[in-house]
Amino acid sequence: MWADLEQIVSRSVIRDLYNVRVRQVEDADASPTEEEERRFRAVLFSELGNKIADQGWARFPAYTPEDRRRLVEVAHRLSGYWGQRVFVEAEDQCRMRLCLAGHEVLPERS
């Protein structure tokens, strides 16, 4: 039974990777187009907004300064949309937390 499952999985992986080609580093342009950036911010606005509305906060990865700027801009747009301030906190080097008042992470007492 497990051998059959392994064959099915390996065939599906091979099929999925059949038309994959590696791009040369010099050919790759990592920056998104204006349209891609606009659409990504719209998705963040919707998805993070829904999560914040449900639980009062949301966490999202932010690996680059551009990721952080994007999340800050989304928080400002949500603040304007709701008429209530959305706070942005850096949790660590790779994560940002957006939250409403009363849902901030309080510093630990010494």
Image (cartoon, rainbow, N blue to C red):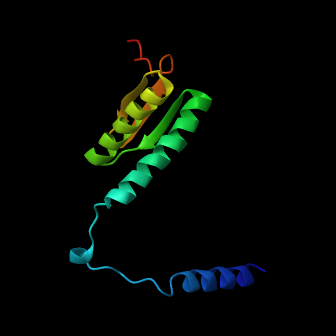
Question: In the image, what residue occupies the spot 37% across and 58% down?
Answer: 35
Front-lying residue, 92 or 65:
65
> Going by the picture, which residue comes out furthest to the top?
110
Question: In the image, what residue occupies the spot 32% across and 41% down?
Answer: 68
**Dividing the picture into quarters, in which one does residue 75 lie?**
top left
Front-lying residue, 33 or 64:
33
> Going by the picture, which residue comes out furthest to the right?
1
| In the displayed structure image, the side of residue 16 where residue 104 appears, left or right | left
Front-lying residue, 27 or 11:
27
Q: Position of residue 6 (x, y in %)?
A: 67, 81
Q: Position of residue 71 (x, y in %)?
A: 38, 40
Residue 34 against residue 8 in the figure, above or below = above
Q: Position of residue 28 (x, y in %)?
A: 27, 72
| In the displayed structure image, the side of residue 62 where residue 27 appears, left or right | left
**Dividing the picture into quarters, in which one does residue 61 lie?**
top left
- Badge count: 0
Front-lying residue, 91 or 101:
101
Question: In the image, what residue occupies the spot 43% across and 22% down?
Answer: 85
Query: On the rendered image, what quadrant is the N terminus found in?
Result: bottom right
Q: Position of residue 15 (x, y in %)?
A: 58, 86
Residue 94 against residue 54 in the figure, above or below = below
Question: In the image, what residue occupies the spot 52% across and 36% down?
Answer: 49
**Dividing the picture into quarters, in which one does residue 8 lie?**
bottom right
Query: On the rendered image, what quadrant is the C terminus found in?
Result: top left
| In the displayed structure image, the side of residue 20 where residue 52 appears, left or right | right
